[in-house]
Image (cartoon, grey):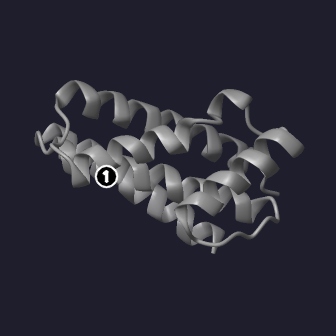
Amino acid sequence: MKELFLARAKENIEAAAELFASEKFNASANRAYYAAFHAALAALLHFGHPTDIDHKPVQASFNRFLLHERKIFPASMKTDLLALQNVRGEADYRDGIGKKRAAAQLKQAQQFVGAIRAVIDTDTP
């Protein structure tokens, strides 16, 4: 399952970048969030902490298990998933977002996914 979620994270971050380049900012924000969400799921599975595949449990487990208890990722990542989800909500269910917010969303998701991939890739035997 971990590899499945890593592949989805990669696919979604690439899609987010392509959508951004095509000026589809709302769709880009959506895919950026899901890239981070899938990366968080992959990290939880990699470090032996299965969780419900739902937004709040994933965020809570990621923060509690991988940030606070195991200290695998920096505490600065604590609010990333929630912030990315909030922007996705604006893009999907409200008035939408513009280029500046979409660019920030994409950058934050790229950093989040990159941090997880860097740790998982170096931790895999």
Image quarter of residue 71: top right
Question: Crowding near pointer 1: few (<14 within 10 Å), some, many (20+)?
Answer: many
Horizontal relation, residue 14 to residue 99: left or right: right
- Residue 123 in the image, given as x and y percentages of width and height: 79, 49
**Which of 84/110 is in front?**
84
Looking at the image, is 92 positioned above or below residue 20? Answer: below
Q: Residue at x 45, y 32 (%)?
A: 108
Q: Amino acid at mark 1?
A: Asn
Q: Quadrant of the C terminus?
A: bottom right
Horizontal relation, residue 58 to residue 28: left or right: right
Mark 1, secondary structure of its residue: helix
Q: Residue at x 72, y 56 (%)?
A: 61
Horizontal relation, residue 46 to residue 88: left or right: right
Residue that mark 1 sits on? 30
Q: Residue furthest front?
A: 94
Does residue 70 appear in this view? no
- Residue 17 in the image, given as x and y percentages of width and height: 28, 42
Does residue 4 appear in this view? yes
- Residue 24 in the image, given as x and y percentages of width and height: 13, 45
Q: Residue at x 62, y 37 (%)?
A: 115
**Which of 9/50 is in front?**
50
Q: Across the whole image, how many numbered discs are drawn on residues? A: 1
- Residue 57 in the image, given as x and y percentages of width and height: 64, 62
Looking at the image, is 97 positioned above or below residue 38? Answer: above
**Which of 80/119 is in front?**
80
Q: Quadrant of the N terminus?
A: bottom right
Q: Residue at x 88, y 44 (%)?
A: 69
Looking at the image, is 40 positioned above or below residue 75? Answer: below
Q: Residue furthest right?
A: 69
